[in-house]
Image: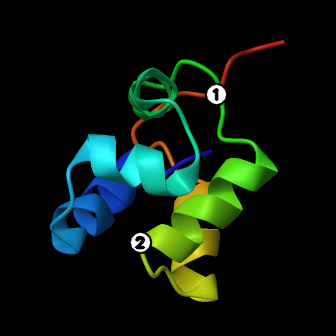
Amino acid sequence: MTDFELLKEKIADSGMTMTAIASKSGMLRETLYNRMKGKGEFNASEIVALTGVLHISKEERDAIFFGEKVVLNTTPKKL
């Protein structure tokens, strides 16, 4: 699951616009916006491209794109 908050921080830290990031990543701007809204998941080539453009370390990449978010205060469903 993508950690959108962490990804947004990296985008803000980059000083680039979403249009510039999309262009440098080889993505359509609309695709990047849709991914950021949770419409579809980032594919491998998009993750590699964003990692390079945003200068994301392997650890940050894994935390952003491959980490699991823990949902607190939820009750397990009964079977």
Give 78 or 2, whichever is nearer the viewer. 2
- Which residue extends farthest right? 79
Q: Position of residue 48 (x, y in %)?
A: 69, 65
**The quarter of the displayed image where residue 65 is located:** bottom right
Left or right: 36 in relation to 28: left
Residue with the mark numbered 1: 76
- Three-letter amino acid code at disc 1? Pro
Q: Residues within 10 Å of mark 1 (few under 14, many from 20)?
A: few
Q: Which residue shows up at 53% across the image and 61% down it?
A: 50
Mark 2 vs mark 1, foreground winner is: 2
Q: Which mark is residue 2?
A: none
Work out which residue is located at the far top of the displayed protein and give it. Answer: 79
15 relative to 50 in the view: left or right: left
| Sequence-first disc among 2 and 1 | 2
Residue at horizontal 30 percent and vertical 40 percent from the top: 19
Residue 13 position within the rendered picture, expressed as x and y whole percent measured from the top left: 19, 72
Residue 61 at what x, y percent from top left? 58, 72
**Quarter of the image that includes the N terminus:** top right
Is residue 66 shown to the viewer in this render?
no
Residue at the spot 66% in from the left edge and 32% down from the top edge: 41
- Answer above or below: position of 33 versus 9: above
Q: Kindly state the secondary structure of the residue where label 1 is placed.
A: loop
Tag 2, which secondary structure?
Answer: loop
Q: Nearer the viewer, residue 57 or 17?
A: 17
Q: Residue 8 location, x and y as percent? A: 28, 53
Residue identifier under label 2 = 54
